[in-house]
């Protein structure tokens, strides 16, 4: 499906594709299979984000996210602090599922805010999510009809899958041993993981999945929401900030230890380990789909996250020089399209 065909499908709906399509270039586009994410403008001049799919798997992805959105807007995102973009259109056109939501402009990307603003904004979002806690059997029974519910058992099962995938695709004995050590650490802390479960959490909570406008934070990708350990969203965010703002990571970690205690800090560390397991399996599975500099970069990423995982398992600080060295390598291997795409949500 090319852009010309998509343009002809959406034109009768009152949408025109924008000339610049940031989601159609860079690494993320190369990994997209079954749906397109596009920028468009309505016949009234308003910018929108379109998600469109013809493939059944892509349609299911959009339908699932739409269902999540509808439930969350009626239950959770009903205040003026955590919000979702307005829905403009949802329907089938010429066999394609089309979903349009309002584009949310922001003055600057998250990491361009002061460190103090970043800390308080992100802390508020995490606390808003934590406020929705399934505390009774009836709550769990109700939400499980729509959202996955993860307890320690589910986290262990997923991590086993990560480890098997890593072993199959990367073939590194040292990494296999490290994944085994990480798994044992998770299992030995089953009680801790369960104690802080049944919370709403966004499992892919990074700057390209939210936008800030004034005091409101808009959640963009609701396909990644489920109920699980309260620190899974924290973990994804903090792993991202290992590269983009390690100082913010330090502030968040210190906050949890000082205000919530050792047990919750351990839960955060365990979730960071779990989320790195996901990253390693993702990059391992991507190796066969890449070539040239992108494949070299994927290998560098695997090596980088392997080292970060080792430090987390051993509960050690990551040397800043190691992270800076990796960033230099990454920047040299990134394509121009990917560097342009990154400007949408990151400085580095």
Image (spheres, helix red, strand yellow):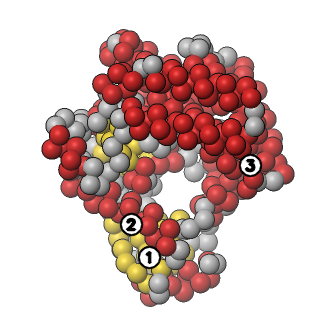
Q: In front here: 146 or 77?
A: 146
Q: Is residue 8 above or below residue 241?
A: below
Q: Quadrant of the N terminus?
A: bottom right
> Which residue is the site of mark 3?
287
The x, y position of residue 123, in whole percent, is 37, 30
Mark linked to residue 63: 2
Mark linked to residue 97: 1
Q: Quadrant of residue 139?
A: top left
Q: Are marks 1 and 2 in contact (CB under 8 Å)?
A: yes
Q: Is residue 124 visible?
A: no
Badge 1 or badge 2: first in the primary sequence: 2
Q: Separation of disc 2 and disc 3 at Cα?
A: 29 Å
Badge 2 or badge 3: first in the primary sequence: 2
* Rendered residue at 69%/50% (across/down): 286
Q: Separation of disc 1 and disc 3 at Cα?
A: 31 Å
Q: Quadrant of residue 67?
A: bottom left
Q: Is residue 108 above or below residue 270?
A: below
Q: Are marks 2 and 3 in contact (CB under 8 Å)?
A: no
The x, y position of residue 281, in whole percent, is 62, 42
Q: Quadrant of the C terminus?
A: top right
């Amino acid at each position: 499906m090319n852009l010309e065909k998509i343009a002809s499908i959406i034109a009768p709906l009152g949408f025109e594709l924008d000339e610049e399509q940031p989601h159609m270039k860079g690494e993320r586009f190369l990994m997209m299979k079954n749906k397109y994410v596009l920028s468009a403008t309505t016949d009234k001049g308003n910018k929108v984000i379109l998600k469109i799919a013809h493939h059944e798997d892509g349609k299911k992805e959009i339908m699932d996210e739409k269902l999540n959105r509808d439930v969350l807007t009626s239950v959770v995102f009903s205040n003026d602090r955590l919000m979702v973009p307005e829905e403009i259109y949802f329907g089938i056109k010429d066999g394609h599922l089309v979903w349009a939501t309002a584009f949310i402009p922001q003055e600057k990307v998250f990491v361009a805010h002061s460190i103090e603003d970043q800390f308080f904004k992100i802390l508020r979002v995490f606390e808003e999510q934590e406020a929705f806690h399934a505390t009774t059997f009836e709550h769990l029974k109700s939400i499980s009809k729509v959202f996955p519910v993860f307890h320690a058992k589910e986290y262990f099962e997923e991590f086993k899958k990560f480890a098997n995938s890593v072993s199959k695709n990367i073939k590194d004995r040292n990494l296999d041993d490290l994944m085994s050590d990480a798994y044992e650490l998770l299992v030995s802390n089953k009680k801790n993981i369960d104690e802080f479960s049944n919370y709403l959490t966004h499992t892919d909570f990074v700057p390209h999945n939210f936008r800030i406008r004034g005091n409101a934070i808009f959640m963009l990708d609701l396909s990644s929401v489920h109920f699980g350990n309260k620190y899974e969203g924290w973990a994804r965010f903090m792993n991202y900030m290992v590269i983009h703002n390690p100082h913010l990571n330090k502030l968040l970690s210190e906050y949890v230890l000082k205000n919530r205690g050792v047990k919750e800090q351990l839960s955060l560390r365990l979730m960071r380990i779990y989320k790195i397991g996901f990253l390693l399996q993702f990059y391992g599975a991507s190796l066969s789909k890449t070539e040239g500099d992108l494949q070299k970069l994927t290998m560098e990423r695997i090596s980088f996250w392997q080292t970060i995982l080792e430090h987390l398992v051993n509960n050690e600080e990551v040397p800043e020089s190691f992270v800076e060295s990796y960033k230099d390598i990454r920047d040299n291997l990134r394509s121009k399209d990917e560097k342009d795409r990154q400007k949408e949500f990151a400085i580095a």
